């Protein structure tokens, strides 16, 4: 999203190398994505969209070779995020014995047009097995 600004500040060549997440993955790392809240609104669907598409506000693709697949991007905000915080035994995936934290989404981010990932809405949030948010409730 900030790609246009990066291009202006550091130039096209260096901007294309910003946040080299695919390079990190190819090197065997398990990179994570985040929201920068409160600097940016905490919307993980927008984060996932940006990680998959790498499109700036003007529509320019910033570092196409650093794009992740939707599945890889989902892992950056779930499994690998939990691991980064040393919480993989309790969080990050739906496994017997874990907390059961999850969201119900309006669309499957692995099956829709990647450009529409940012439009996915959280319909319900479940924390420790209990519904704590339902859209429209």
Image: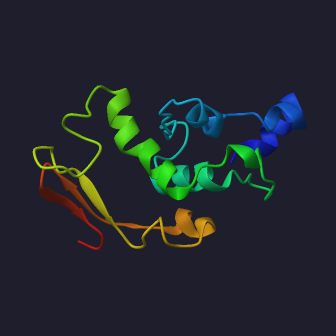
- Residue 18 percent location from the top left of the image: 72, 34
Q: Which part of the image, by quadrant, shows the C terminus?
A: bottom left
- Residue 119 percent location from the top left of the image: 53, 68
Q: How is the image coloured?
A: rainbow
Q: Is residue 78 left or right of residue 30?
A: left
Q: How many marks?
A: 0
- State whether residue 35 is above or below residue 130: above
- Residue 115 percent location from the top left of the image: 63, 66
Residue positioned 27% across, 48% down in the render: 93
Q: Is residue 107 left or right of residue 113?
A: left
Instruction: Name the image quarter holding residue 7.
Output: top right
Residue positioned 74% across, 51% down in the render: 56
- State whether residue 118 is above or below residue 27: below
Q: Is residue 91 left or right of residue 74?
A: left
Residue positioned 65% across, 34% down in the render: 23
- Residue 60 percent location from the top left of the image: 81, 54
């Amino acid at each position: 999203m900030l790609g246009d600004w990066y291009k202006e500040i550091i130039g096209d060549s260096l901007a294309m190398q910003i946040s080299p997440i695919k390079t990190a993955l190819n090197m065997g790392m398990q990179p994570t994505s985040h929201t920068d809240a409160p600097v940016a609104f905490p919307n993980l669907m927008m984060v996932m969209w940006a990680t998959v598409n790498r499109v700036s506000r003007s529509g320019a693709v910033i570092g196409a070779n650093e794009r992740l697949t939707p599945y890889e991007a989902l892992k950056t905000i779930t499994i690998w995020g939990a691991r980064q915080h040393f919480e993989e035994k309790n969080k990050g995936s739906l496994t017997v014995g874990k907390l059961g934290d999850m969201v119900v989404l309006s669309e499957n981010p692995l099956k829709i047009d990647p450009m529409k990932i940012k439009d996915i809405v959280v319909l319900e949030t479940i924390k420790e097995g209990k519904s704590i948010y339902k859209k429209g409730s």
